[in-house]
Image (cartoon, coloured by chain):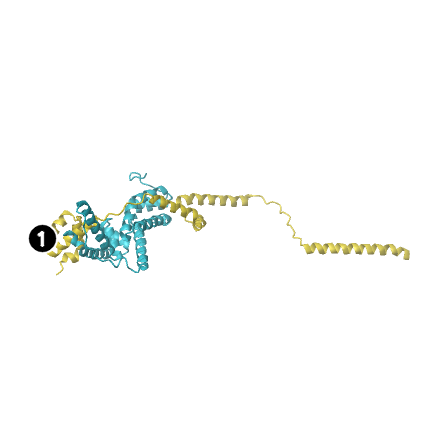
Chain colours: A cyan, B yellow
Amino acid sequence: MLTNAQPYMLPGVENDMAVAAAATLDYDAELMLRVKEGDDVTFGVLLEKHRVPVIHFVFRLVQEQAIAEELSQEVFLRVYRSRSSYEPTAKFKTWLFRIATHLALNWLRDEKHERGQERLDDVSMDLPALQICDRRPSVEQEMVSEVKLDQVRRAVAGLPEKQRAAVLMHKYEEMEYTQIARVLGCSESAVKSLLFRAYETLRARLAHMGTS
Amino acid sequence: MICPIQIRKPEMLLAYAAGDLDPESARLLEAHLAGCSACREIAKDQATVWKALDGWEAPPVSPDFNRRLYGRIDQGLQLSWWERLTRPFRPMPLRQALPLTATAGLLLMAGLLLQHTRPLAPAAPSGEIVRADQVERTLDDLDLLHQFNGTAATAESAQPDAM
């Protein structure tokens, strides 16, 4: 098992330089360089560390668990297959989420095309009135929270794709604006604008939850 | 009218609602919020959005996720004919490639040196290529020669009698 106390040094000046460059970025990039050198055990370490965040991120983007897992498998498969050409030019997480976002947004576009935009664009905020027949508070609470959750899911799904990805990385992955910008391939100011517009839409759709 | 904070520092309101603003900036913003109802409203609604998003939990990951992934990796390694075909030509890690290249270079040099230092062996007789029609023609020629010799011998034996 790798620890920070045991820095990995490769023979040769080139590799030393690559490791030094990776170390300035992050430790995961350094681990990925070990995978590049043929260390498959380290790939397992990276998989364990990033598996859940990637799957959850993709799940919130596509909102289907089976699809999210399938796409996440493809993400890690691509990481493994491109190990020989890996260069630590960015943080490992940025690179990983760039692959994940690319795959998920592609899937959403294909899906949207196939379904004639029926599912994501036809998001109606007019949910049917909640009929509560059972007076037990636990069931009532459960139903209310289920309705609220559904509203959150629909509000997020109703956002344009890039805004959605930006919100999910900002809110759940706590990624910085610069990192999100690199994942989405745009400027930092564009990310700020994307996020502010996205949260503006979400405020309009979800603000009523604060009063209920 | 839109408050300048919403134009110049919208991320400040987002960070405040998320509780991520440093204490000094938070204190300054709160002083502003006390007098700006528009920003106060945004901060309140943003906090509601934040809380609503907090409640959205993703389902747990399937326990066989890793097994399926490694299966796909192995399958790719075993079944992809293209990978099998191109694997020897793929760029090799430097630490593996260097010793291999050095060994190959040494063997090549040793071979060249041995070839130059070895005494010249006597030239092997060069083999002739014998064609079937050539053999046939030679046999025919031999037959003709025999016939000619036979005729010549008969004529020779008949000649003394004539003399």
Q: Indicate left or right for A203 with A14 as reference.
A: left
Which residue is situated farthest in the front direction here? A133
Residue B119, horizontal then vertical, whole percent: 58, 43
Q: From the viewer's perspective, is residue B150 above or below residue B121?
A: below
Looking at the rendered structure, the secondary structure element under dot 1 is helix
Q: Position of residue A159 (x, y in %)?
A: 24, 57
In front of the other: B9 or B45: B45
| Label 1 chain ID | B
Residue A112's spot in the image, x, y percent?
A: 30, 58
**Identity, as a three-letter code, of the amino acid under mark 1:** Ala
If the image is split into quadrants, where does the C terminus of chain B sit? bottom right
| Residue A35 position by quadrant | top left
Q: Position of residue A41 (x, y in %)?
A: 35, 41
- Residue A180 is left or right of residue B73, and the answer is left
* Residue closer to the observer: B3 or A55: A55
Name the one closer to the observer, B103 or A141: A141
Which image quadrant: the N terminus of chain B? bottom left
Q: Disc 1 marks which residue?
A: B34
